[in-house]
Amino acid sequence: MNSQKPVLYNTSLITDDDIYLFNEGSHFRLYEKLGSHPVKKGKLEGTHFAVWAPDAVEVFVMGDFNGWNKSSHPLRPQKESGIWEGFIPDVGKGSNYKYHVVSIFHGYRVEKADPFAIYNEVPPKTTMAVVREILER
């Protein structure tokens, strides 16, 4: 279990150009930026998570790697884009996850699917899995 690994914020896959195109509505390769992406940066391997949640005050990644803890892996907002992101070390291909979102509306909390996930479980199960190959960054 990975519950003690902190979320890192210095491994972003999202550039200022991506945010500009996203806000303009003309980013045609969002699947390369949002969702879950296994990444290797130097000797560090893990997964970069990014999701658009414009009405959130907090977003967390919960999964089998942290015992489905709703608050141990917070994501950070990416400027004023509504995109939340973070890198979690040692989370890789096959890890199941979903997002826990806290809304600006009365602190409403909800578990959300990843709209950019490649693999989703069949109902009544509701998790996504990291399935892409590792990207060298």
Image (tube, rainbow, N blue to C red):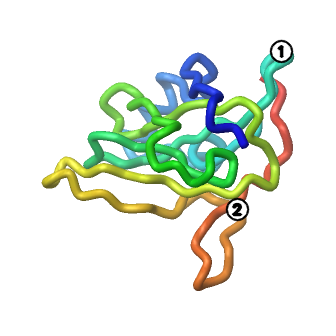
Label 1 sits on residue:
42
Give above or below for 66 relative to 68: above
Please identify the quarter of the rendering in which residue 91 is found.
Answer: top right
**Can you say which quadrant of the picture contains the N terminus?**
top right
**Frontmost residue, 18 versus 66:** 66
Rendered residue at 62%/37% (across/down)? 3
Q: Secondary structure at mark 1?
A: loop
Q: Position of residue 21 (x, y in %)?
A: 45, 36
Give above or below for 16 relative to 131: above
Q: Residues within 10 Å of mark 2 (few under 14, many from 20)?
A: some
Rendered residue at 42%/39% (across/down)? 83
Q: Position of residue 86 (x, y in %)?
A: 55, 31
Please identify the quarter of the rendering in which residue 71 is found.
Answer: top left
Q: Position of residue 29 (x, y in %)?
A: 61, 46
Rendered residue at 51%/32% (across/down)? 18
Number of the label disc, if any, that sits on residue 118: 2
Q: Is residue 131 left or right of residue 124?
A: right
Q: Position of residue 107 (x, y in %)?
A: 20, 51
Give above or below for 36 relative to 21: below
Q: Is residue 6 left or right of residue 25?
A: right
Q: Residues within 10 Å of mark 1 (few under 14, many from 20)?
A: few
